[in-house]
Image (cartoon, helix red, strand yellow):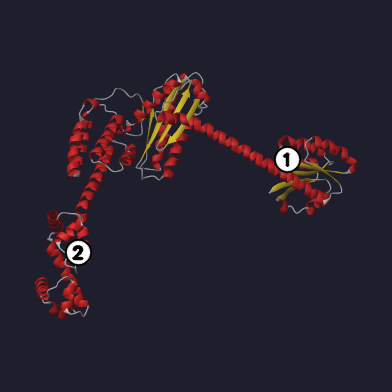
Amino acid sequence: MLKVVIADDEERICQLIRALIDWESLSMEIAGVAHNGLEACALVREKQPDILITDIRMPGCSGMDLIERVKEYTDGLEIIVISGHAHFEYAQQAIKFGVGDYLLKPINKKELTATLEKLKEQICRRMESEQDKRELQRRAQQDVQRMRESLPAGLFRQEEMPLSMEILQKKYHLQCREGLYQAVCVKMDCERRALNHASSAVLMEKVREVLEQGLRDRCLEMVLCVQDFYCIGVIHFEKERRDEIRRILKSCLNQMELQKGLFSSVTFSMSAGNVCGQPEGLKESMKEAVFLIQDRIVKGTGRLFEYPGQPSALKEGNAAEKYLREITRAAELLSTEKSDEAVAVLKEEIQEIRDIHGCEVMDLVHSAAEVFSAQTQMENRTARLEEFRNNCEQCRSVEELLSCMGKFQSEQIDGMAAKRENDTTRPIRNAKQYIQNHYSEPITQEEVSNEVGLSAAYFSVLFKKTEGEGFAKYLIGVRIEQAKILLRETNLPVTEVCRKVGYNDVKHFTHTFEKAVGVKPATYRRLYG
C-alpha cells in the first residue's frame, strides 16, 4: 500500500479529500493528517509517505516552505499542491520545486482520482527501476565477490595462475599496496555422516566469520572462501603487523575450537604458508599451507601448523613394495585377514620413520588404494577412489586413516567373494528352478546341465558340492514331495499321481515312494489324506 499524508489548515478540506477517494481500490492508505506546515513537516519525516497532498497556504510554515524542507530528505516523495485561483502564482512556483501536480479549489473527485492514479504509476515505475538497479548492483557485487574468491580457490586447486599486483587489482579486485602476502587454510574434521550438509555449511561459515572479524581491521586486504570442509584464504598486510597477524590466527583457531562444545565430533586445525613480499609468492604459500594442514594426522588437531621442515625418509623405504606383495596375495585369496595384514605393513613402516609428514602419509595411503584397486580390478574405480579420498580427508589421525583404508579393502574383497560365490551357485539355482518346472517330464542330468550351460561332468560335481547330494537323488526328492502333496490334497488314483510326478512305472514309483517315506502311497493317503 502507498502511504498518503494530507496537509491543510481547513478541517473540512481534509475530510473532503478523505471522503472523495476509494483509497483501498488505489492500493493507498491515509498515513496521517496535518493542519499546519510544521505539523506536516514532522508527519512526513515520521511516516515517510509516498504522496503528500498539501495546501499552498498554511499557518506556521507555508506549503512552499514545507515542499522545500521535505524535498531535502525525501527525494522520492510525490507532491500534489492544492491552490485557490488567488494563489495560482504560488502553484506555478511550486512546480519549479518538482511537485507532481496541482489542483485548484474546489477539489474535483474525478480530477483528484486521475492525479493520484498518474502519481501511482510514476511511483511504481520508479520502484521497478530502483529494484532493477539494486538487482544489477547486487549481481555486480556477486560477480566481484566470485572473482575475489576465485583467487584462493584457484590457488588451493593448484591451477596455473599468473599473479602480479596489477592482476590482483584488475582481475581479482584486491586493493594492494606495499606489504606482505600469505595463504591460510582451516580444516574442519568430522565423520562425513556426523553432520548433514546444512550443519557443516553453518559451521564453515562460522569459521569464515571468525577469521573475517579477527583479521578485517588488521589486513590491507583479505579474501576467504569455503570449499567443502576447508576455509582457505589470502591475506595482505603491512610488514610491521607480521607477528600480530600470527597471534590473531592462533586466537581465531581457539575461537573455532569452542564450537566443539556444540558438536563434539568436530575438530579444527589451521595452517599458514610462508610469508612473501610479492603476489607471485602466493602460489608457493598456498601449496605450503595445503601441505602443512595434513600434519594434523600425525601431530594432532586443534593446532596452527607452520614451517614444513625437511622431507622424511619415507621415500627411501620400501613400504609400497611390501604392501604390494601382501595385497596381491590378499586379492588372490579374497582374504580380508590378509588385506588387514597389508594395512599393518603400512602402519609398521609409518611408525618406524621419524618426523614423517601428514601429507607423505596421505600420499602413501592414496597410492596404496590405487594399487589395490588395480590388483582387484575394481568396478567403478574412479568413483570409488574419489569417495575413498574424500573419506580420508576427514581422518584426524594415522590410526583413523589406516582404519579407513582397511574398511575400503575389506568391503571390496567381501564384495568380490560374494560375487564369485554368486557366479558359482547361479547355474545350480537355475538348474533347481528348471527341475521344479519340469519334474513331471522324463528329464535327465545331461538335459539340465545343457540348459544351464555346463558340461555334464562339471555340473555333476558342482551340484553335489552345492546341494550336498547328487542330481538324481535331488530329482527323486522333488518328485516324492510333489506326490505327497497330490496324495494328501486330491482324489487322483495312485497311477495318475505316478504319471504326474514323472514316473511311467507304478511299481517303480511305489517302491521308490516306500523307500523314501516308509509307507506305500495308498497307506500314506489313508494316514494323511
Q: Could you say where residue 153 lies in the image, as x and y percent from the top left?
A: 43, 31
454 in relation to 133, above or below: below
Q: Which mark is residue 37?
A: none
Q: Could you say where residue 357 lies in the image, as x and y percent from the top left?
A: 29, 28
Judged by depth in the image, the label closer to the viewer, 2 or 1, is 2
Instruction: Report helix, strand or loop for mark 2.
Output: helix
Q: Is residue 100 left or right of residue 316?
A: right
Answer yes or no: is residue 213 visible: no
Answer yes or no: is residue 415 visible: yes
Between 381 and 437, the one lying in front of the other is 437
Q: Is residue 225 left or right of residue 339?
A: right
Mark 2 vs mark 1: which is more N-terminal?
A: 1
Do callouts 2 and 1 mark residues in contact (Cβ within 8 Å)? no
Q: Could you say where residue 155 lies in the image, as x and y percent from the top left?
A: 42, 28
Q: Which mark is residue 435?
A: 2
Q: Which residue is mark 1?
A: 77
Q: Could you say where residue 225 lies in the image, as x and y percent from the top left?
A: 45, 33
- Seen at 22% across and 25% down, the residue is 316
- Seen at 69% across and 40% down, the residue is 126
**Label 2 is placed on what type of residue?**
Ile
- Seen at 13% across and 79% down, the residue is 523
Between 44 and 233, the one lying in front of the other is 233
Separation of marks 2 and 1 at Cα, in angstroms:
92 Å
Few, some or many C-alpha atoms within 10 Å of disc 1 (few <14, some 14-19, many ≥20)?
many
